[in-house]
Amino acid sequence: MRPWILLLPLLVVLAGCKPEDTPAALRMVHTLVVETKRINDDRQAIGEVKPRYESDLSFRVAGKVLSRLVDVGAWVKQGDTLATLDTQDYQNRLRSAEADVSSAEAALVNAQGTEARQAKLLKDGWTPKATYDTALQNLQAAEARLKAAKAILDLNHDQLNYTTLKADFDGVITAVGAETGQNVNAGQMVVKLARPDDKDGVFNIAETAFNDISKTQLEVVVWPLSNPDLTLGGVVREISPVADPVTRTYAVKVTLNNPPP
């Protein structure tokens, strides 16, 4: 036990000895004064050229598509036939309406004769006033039924004409929505017709890009991907008021000064 007792104070003494602290090395510090400057952010986006005016053409009546005479890319003139419906049902309705008009005309002729006879008998004192009033009411009712029958006839004429879809203006077909043999509803898109003269560049821009839209006209530069050396000037015509809920981008439409063909 004694050797251990003698070494313990020695270890304690050695542990208390520390080397002197070395001075820390001096380091040079570089300073820089930060100034606020405007950053010219060159934002770029990929879009596509679309017609400014594009209409969904459809039939005003429902039916079975008998023929579709145009495909995507076809150029049409105003008044050209684009598609037709089966007209059998509308022809039957038209013949029924024509028969109703003939029946109403015959009833009117009969009511006119009865009113004329009762008027003469009333004038000569051979019939009471109530009998003439009944004949006059029947005449007025016959005239009203004839007007209604003619209106229905005109309506059936129009519906028969609506079975032919015609182009409202000169343009190019950009999409089709119905095929031959398909049953379509009134107002369902059959073909989409676009005006080729007016074109827009359509881009989807992130909402963080709109840091300054106070200008009345925002000018942009557009160039085709196939020919980057060809630059086209443009002015922002429309910015969608609401961002896309998924991509959080805004649709921006640019009027091109020299749109590509």
Image: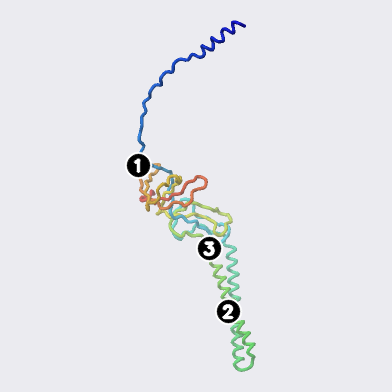
| CA gap, disc 2 and disc 3 | 29 Å
**Residue 21 location, x and y as percent?**
44, 18
Decide which of tag 1 and tag 3 comes sooner along the chain: 3
Task: Report the disc number at residue 143.
Answer: 2
- As helix, strand or loop, the secondary structure at mark 3 comes to loop
**Residue 103 location, x and y as percent?**
61, 76
Residue for point 46% across, 49% down: 251
Residue for point 58% across, 56% down: 183
Task: Report the disc number at residue 242.
Answer: none
Q: Residue furthest top?
A: 3
Label 1: how many Cα within 10 Å (few below 14, some 14–19, many 20+): few
Q: Mark 1 — residue?
A: 229
**Residue 168 location, x and y as percent?**
46, 60
Image quarter in which the N terminus is found: top right
Looking at the rendered structure, the kind of residue marked 2 is: Glu
| Left or right, 224 with reference to 187 | left
Label 3: how many Cα within 10 Å (few below 14, some 14–19, many 20+): some
- As helix, strand or loop, the secondary structure at mark 2 comes to helix
Residue 171, by quadrant, is bottom left
Vertical position of residue 143 compared to residue 261: above or below: below
Looking at the rendered structure, the kind of residue marked 3 is: Tyr
Decide which of tag 1 and tag 2 comes sooner along the chain: 2
Looking at the rendered structure, the kind of residue marked 1 is: Asp
Q: Mark 3 — residue?
A: 162
Q: Are marks 1 and 3 in contact (CB under 8 Å)?
A: no
Vertical position of residue 102 compared to residue 196: above or below: below
Q: Is there any visible trace of residue 110 in the rendered image? A: no
**Residue 178 location, x and y as percent?**
54, 53
| Left or right, 32 with reference to 53 | left
Label 2: how many Cα within 10 Å (few below 14, some 14–19, many 20+): some
